[in-house]
Image (spheres, rainbow, N blue to C red):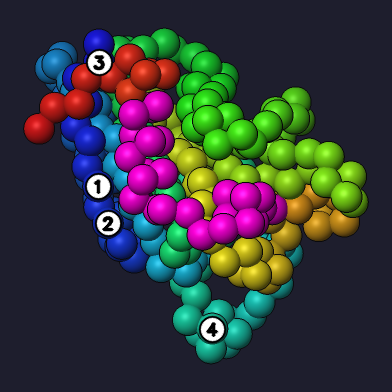
Amino acid sequence: MKSTHYIDLGKMPYKEAWDYQQKLFDQLVDRKKNGLPNVNYLLFVEHFPVYTLGKSGSMENLLLNEAELKQNEIDFFKINRGGDITYHGPGQIVVYPVFDLDHFKHDIRWLVHSLEESVIKLLLSYGISTKRISEYTGVWIGDDKKNMDRKICAVGIHISKWVTMHGIAFNVNTDLSYFENIVPCGISPLEKSVTSMQKELGKTMDFDLVKTQLKNVLREVFELEYIA
């Protein structure tokens, strides 16, 4: 079992949570450099409306200008994770694993797959069938009336010295209209779309319950031992 501090940050502005996980990330990297033992951190947070653009993303996929962002009270940040542009906001569970992969596997694909697998297991318990798409990360649902795949969970990570940060954004009761202001993950809305548990099941979900369930599934998949 991997000793892991589980921390629920509640509702927090994106920049504040980013600074916090960066601090933890830097601490883990520094401890590794000095040959000191590490623990892991698993952060849960719900953000206020924000668009984030990954290091390989294109500004053309943000469809609002600075004035429109301000008018709609939406923050925007360019960040150091992989992937393109995405949205975080209320009703979405964001999970940041700040892991030392020395405790797990030196395998980025394994990490992404395991994060996806955690959400897949949770959704299956609600009777929601999902799939992976080889050319894209994240968790997808298919076979709607438009025969269009739709993403319910995005994945974007950053790794240095085998320490991780950033993670997943899982749409539970998310207001999906915010995705209309971007080209999510750089994928045309004519090809793919986004969805949420609320939309798929036709009801507002018990957010705290889903959060607890996801915490438990992550513990199982990654073989974590939560510590104070």
Q: Examine the rendered structure and indicate whether residue 27 appears above or below residue 179.
A: above
Q: For mark 2, what is the residue? A: 10
Q: For mark 4, what is the residue? A: 72
Q: Secondary structure at mark 3?
A: strand
**Residue in view at x 57 percent, y 58 percent:** 203
Q: Answer left or right for 17 relative to 135.
A: left
How far, Cα to Cα, is label 1 from label 2? 6 Å
How far, Cα to Cα, is label 4 from label 3? 42 Å
Q: Secondary structure at mark 1?
A: strand
Image spot of residue 186 (x, y percent)? 73, 52
Q: Are marks 4 and 1 in contact (CB under 8 Å)?
A: no
Image spot of residue 95 (x, y percent)? 39, 42
The overriding secondary structure of the stretch rendered in magenta is helix
Q: Examine the rendered structure and indicate whether residue 56 appears above or below residue 46.
A: above
Residue type highlighted by circle 4: Asn
Q: Earlier in the sequence, mark 4 or mark 3?
A: 3
Q: For mark 1, what is the residue? A: 8
**Label 4: how many residues lie within 10 Å, few (<14), some (14-19) or many (20+)?**
few
Image spot of residue 127 (x, y percent)? 61, 34
Q: Earlier in the sequence, mark 4 or mark 1?
A: 1
How far, Cα to Cα, is label 2 from label 4? 22 Å
- Is residue 200 at least partly visible in the picture? yes
Residue farthest toward the left in the current orientation of the protein = 228
**Residue in view at x 68 percent, y 32 percent:** 129
Q: Nearer the viewer, residue 10 or 145?
A: 145
**Residue in view at x 33 percent, y 23 percent:** 219
**Residue in view at x 73 percent, y 60 percent:** 183
Residue type highlighted by circle 1: Asp
Q: Nearer the viewer, residue 200 or 221?
A: 200
